[in-house]
Amino acid sequence: MMTQSEGKNQQDASLETALSDNVGLTTNEGSAFCRLPHDIFVVIASMCISDLDEVFLSDDGQWIRPNLRDLNASLEEHLLLTHICSDWRRLSLMTPSLWSKICLLWAPQAVDTFAARSGAALLSLTLPATSPELKDEFTEFLVHQTKIVTTNMHRIRALDLHFFHSLGRESTDVSVPYQTLFDSIIGHPAKQLKTFRLIISHDTFPHQSSIVNLFNLDAPLLETIHLERCSSYQNFDPSAFPSLISLTIHAQARNSLSNLSQVTRILSNARQLVHFTFEGLGAAFDEYRDPQPSPTVVLPHCITISLRDCFTDQITYFLSVLSVSSLQSLTIDGIQRREWVNGSETQLNPLSYLPVPFRVAFVDVPYLAINLQNIQISLEIKSSTRYHLYYREKSLQSHLQGWEGFWATRMLSAASENLVINPTQLEILVTHCDLECLLLPIISKKTWMDVLLRLPALTCLNFDSDSPIPFSALSRLALALTDRRRICPALVTLKMECPFSPRDEPAIQKMFQERIPVTLINRGLSALMSQD
């Protein structure tokens, strides 16, 4: 009967043989490079082994579904160090930390070998999204890997799980092994766990993924929780995790939240948070919320907040209930919703609820950029002291309707109206914007005056468009700039970079001649500016 040690040696041998067929083993004993001290070797080896997050994440931060080639490459990268020379092989086998990063889509034999070689080192386990070509092996793999995870829960430092439910029409239903894995870990204490990420790729996941009793509420070192599309966040109490400083909740799964008050309740039990991200259901969750008169949730250490896929009133509600005196970075990606009060249209202003230290942090910012893109408007501003604001709103209405009213003026004026800011440079970026949008009041004379009146220190105005700008739109800017006493009295540079016909240049220059010479840069696109 084979002993456990003999079984392990046989697994190791077959694994090394498989790699040697592709890589080979070099035994250059005389090379000084192969006789490095152990500590230096560990540093070099650790730098050579890519983090699995880097391997299975695309350039834009999205998870990819690795195929067999990707998986084998990530495995061989780890094993390659043992095949440089015999000294490096010996050093690597006596360094448990080099074997502590494990992909749960590797073959069970490889996972067992890495788990054994890691000794007592803390583990980082990653289950990436599943490629359709792995559908035949996947269920078998996951049953085995579930045992590995549960057996080693006491020494897992990072656990990254991506449940990808749909593998194609003809594939095996993988929800059952996913559910088994989820149920197995959810009730286990995780004494050493610092980072937990659970991503469910589809809101049609047929089983329960409630995190109400996450890790049996026994993960004292857990610092980061990242959850996407869990079936329910109700009754989740983060106060059970005293070390928690980063919380991400993506509530795209229907019925995962019944109202926004549940989110504020979660936050009220996480006073130690430093980073918070919430992504809502977008238009599918249309609960209207009025802003509160005073904050009810105090997060004294929170420096980063990101609110996405929520209506403007919902974002305003969040900012009105939060007391975040240490805020340094705010990202808002909202959805414009038209509201009517006493028969008149009104617009809530999320930035009016920012804490005072954040508002005054941009006083030295020299540059402000505003981006117009069909039915969405965004602005971004950064200070020299690490303060950052990104604010975007989009409209769910048609192009023409979405730009009507005073929504556009409010967005264009948002930074100068709500922050203590006095930039000397303003750049208006127009990207992928339809001609019909440019003809609307978004760039009327009144809009320009409302925006520019709040920027008295402006010396340079850049207008950058990838589409031809109608003469009517340019004339409104020219008319706004004629009042040199009130509108940007310090303005000395006006630059426009956009497609235009060379024969139109004299007309454009004449349009602005009463105030300032304009520098025109022709992008050289085929579309030409038309007079109207």
Image: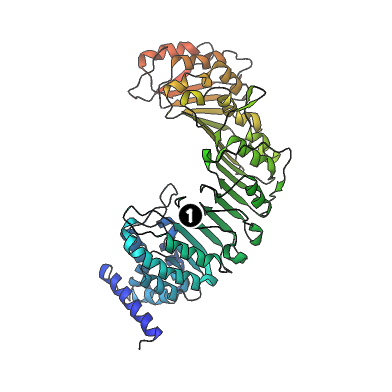
Image coords of residue 47 (percent x, y): 44, 62
Residue at x 53%, y 60% (from the top left corner):
196
What colouring style does the render use? rainbow
Most extreme residue toward the bottom, as rendered? Answer: 1
Horizontal side, residue 288 vs residue 427: left or right: right
Residue 94 rendering spot, x and y as whole percentages: 44, 77
- Residue type marked 1: Ile
Query: In the rendered view of the protein, which quadrant contains the C terminus?
Result: top left
Residue 241 higher or lower than 386, as above or below: below
Q: Is residue 390 visible?
A: yes
Name the one closer to the observer, 314 or 508.
314
Viewer-closest of 239 and 120 = 239
Task: Mark 1: give few (<14), some (14-19) or many (20+) Cα within 10 Å.
Answer: some
| Residue 510, placed above or below residue 343 | above
* Front position in the image: 156 or 52: 156
- Quarter of the image for the N terminus: give it: bottom left
Residue 49 sits in quarter: bottom left
User: Under tag 1, what secondary structure?
Assistant: strand
Percent position of residue 117, x then y: 43, 75
Residue under label 1, please give it. 199
Image position, residue 112 (x, y; %): 40, 73
